[in-house]
Image (spheres, helix red, strand yellow):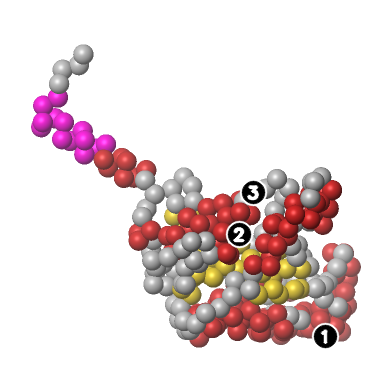
Amino acid sequence: MPPAMDEPTLLPALTRIAEALERLAPPPAGGIDLTGADAFVWHPEPRARLAPVPRVAAVPIALLRGVDRQRDMLLENTMRFARGFTANNAMLWGARGAGKSSLVKAAHAAANAELPGSLALIEIHREDIRSLPELLGALRSQPRRCIVFCDDLSFEREDADYKALKSVLDGGIEGRPPNVLFYATSNRRHLMSRDMIENERSGAIHGNEAVEEKVSLSDRFGLWIGFHNADQDTFFAMIEGYAAHFGLPVAATDLRAQAVEWSVTRGGRSGRVAWQFILDLAGRLGVRIDA
């Protein structure tokens, strides 16, 4: 057996062990600092932390065209929350590239422009949804109001992560923290594909009951906002709004002709396609855009 360590030798060893354990342990809820930035990304592993985002890639809300009704609904909900009143969790669903995530970031920026520092935007990745209760537990004691945002949220067959989200939306025994809202975007209205719903139904003894829990998840969002593909006039309004904002020196007729050609090569018209066209056009014209 090794010789016993005397007290002067043992104390430094114990101190080093305690310091090592402290470095490995996740920070306590009260240790989260939301004062260093207006946006953060949640990383639950290997050590739970919020990484500050110095600059959010957000389009000014005035430049989002063709989504006036959706913009007004989300902005009103967000501003009400920023002012300290109750508001609803929101799900933005529908066509790809229609501006769902852009609208969330723009609404957050608009709220902080009017009420500086009022809201923190915290992004949680789809694969980390199971850690959502842990994140909300850490945010519960924070004085700052937070929007937790998950982009492109959906669930596959045999995916049990939706239970973590359900517990948050339902409130659980603790209830949702009053200083937190949850915003999500999805291409699927019910957060799972139609063929998966049918597979679940056909493979169960009580088909309707088998999918009810998953399908009803979207019903737990207080605010549903649908997005659809843009028609040509709306697409032109997007293009022309961007071109005017960035001062692109191109004639209106030429701008539209190029935009139509671009949308054909991309196979559709959407806010994302319009923005990609503007980035390409600005580059060809030698105009710098801080994208």
Who is closer to the viewer here, 30 or 291?
30
Mark 2: which amino acid?
Lys
Q: Quadrant of residue 24?
A: top left
Residue 259 to residue 233: above or below: above
Query: Which mark is drawn over residue 166?
Result: 2
Disc 3 to disc 1, how far (Cα)? 51 Å
Q: Quadrant of the C terminus?
A: bottom right
Disc 3 to disc 2, how far (Cα)? 10 Å
Q: What secondary structure prevails in the magenta region?
A: helix
Who is closer to the viewer here, 137 or 25?
137
Mark 3: which amino acid?
Ala
Asked if the stretch drawn in magenta spans residue 148, the answer is: no
Q: Which residues are magenta?
A: 5-17
Res. 263 visible in picture? yes
Who is closer to the viewer here, 47 or 139?
139
Residue 1 to residue 275: above or below: above
Q: Quadrant of the N terminus?
A: top left
Label 3: which secondary element: loop
Name the mark nearer the viewer: 3 or 1. Answer: 3
Query: Mark 1 highlights which residue?
Result: 252
Query: Which mark is drawn over residue 160?
Result: 3
Label 1: which secondary element: helix
> What residue lies at 26% left-to-right and 40% top-to-bottom?
18
| Pointers 1 and 2 in contact (C-beta within 8 Å) | no
Q: Position of residue 13 (x, y in %)?
A: 21, 33
Query: Which mark is drawn over residue 56?
Result: none
Who is closer to the viewer here, 231 or 127?
127
1 or 2: tag closer to the N-terminus? 2
